[in-house]
Image: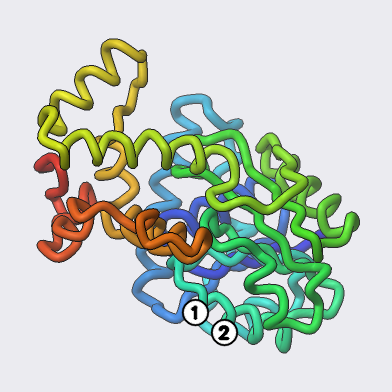
Amino acid sequence: MIRTVTVIGAGTMGAEIAALAALGGYETYLHDNSSDALMLAGARLQSRLHAMEEKGKIGEGAGRLALARLHFEPVLERAVREADFVIEAVYEDLELKRRIFADLDRLAPAHAVLATNSSTIVSSRIADATGRPAKVINMHFFTPPLVMEIVEVVQGPHVADETVAATVEVAMAMGRQPALLKKETFGFVANRVLGAILNEALKIVADGVCSHEEVDQIVQKALGHTLPPFRILDLVGNDVAWYVGQERARWTGNPADGPSPLLTEKVQRGELGRKTGKGWYTYG
């Protein structure tokens, strides 16, 4: 039975996943090496949960109860020593994830499931860093987790059915709909489809067909996409999209599948999107 959930990484994704776990009734630990990141996450979640209560998104008093279950812990050993289920939500870096999973394998109870929120690195590339590969799984939340209602659960060839069942149980307790993928594929489903759209949009601009503003306008007005391609890139982060391109090229073995030169230019200039105030668009 799953009673305690630990989330690794106190960025926007990790913090909101931890909030979902606490709202779902789990005793929850949010870990980050940075105490400042934990303090910021705590302040942000307190404000966010209060706003959700006021808007009727969650029940009255639910935010307060969730915050009472949520513990901010900078020491990894203390964060995972009672964990039944761990969700890693750090930057998309394979070697970093493998180091974290090796530490989790050493410090977390033997029965604990170790999940990664990655959408580009399949769990079979991480599982052998642990002594429990059958308990290592992809559990991919979408941005922002407190809003997006679906979670991709990916059963790689190494993943036990019991691990899948536990992951589905946690997703449902969080109020999220688990979508089970029976096979590993780069980008899973949503990001595989989205990646095709974003790559085509970048090619159109690189070929000089029209500007990125015009691409967004056409996609928004003609196809009915509320959030068009270049707005998505700014929301996700051009650096994240660039890294996804790097991983895609490694997956296929084809350098042509790497990131668009336009993305490389944005990253080199530090124009990463909303988080830096400028990307394809300028933000206040």
Q: How far, Cα to Cα, is label 2 from label 1?
A: 5 Å
Q: In the displayed image of the protein, which residue is found farthest to the top?
A: 222
Question: Is residue 233 rendered to the left or right of residue 42?
Answer: left
Residue 78 position, x and y percent, is 64, 83
Residue 41 visible in this rendered orientation of the protein: no
- Decide: is 20 above or below 61: below
Residue named by callout 2: 99
Residue 154 position, x and y percent, is 70, 51
Residue 280 visible in this rendered orientation of the protein: yes
Question: Is residue 185 rendered to the left or right of residue 53?
Answer: right
**Is disc 1 placed on a helix, strand or loop?**
helix
State the image quarter where residue 221 is shown: top left
Residue at point 24%, 39% (across, down): 203
Q: Quadrant of the C terminus?
A: top left
What mark, if any, has residue 166 been given in the picture? Answer: none
Q: Quadrant of the N terminus?
A: bottom right
81 or 128, which lies in front?
Answer: 128
Residue type at tag 1? Leu
**Disc 2 vs disc 1: Cβ atoms closer than 8 Å?**
yes
Dot 1: within a 10 Å radius of its alpha carbon, few (fewer than 14), some, or many (20 or more) residues? few
Image label count: 2
State the image quarter where residue 265 is shown: bottom left
Residue type at tag 2? Arg
Residue at point 37%, 62% (across, down): 255
Dot 2: within a 10 Å radius of its alpha carbon, few (fewer than 14), some, or many (20 or more) residues? some
What mark, if any, has residue 96 been given in the picture? Answer: 1
Residue 84 position, x and y percent, is 79, 67
Residue at point 71%, 86% (across, down): 107
162 or 210, which lies in front?
Answer: 210
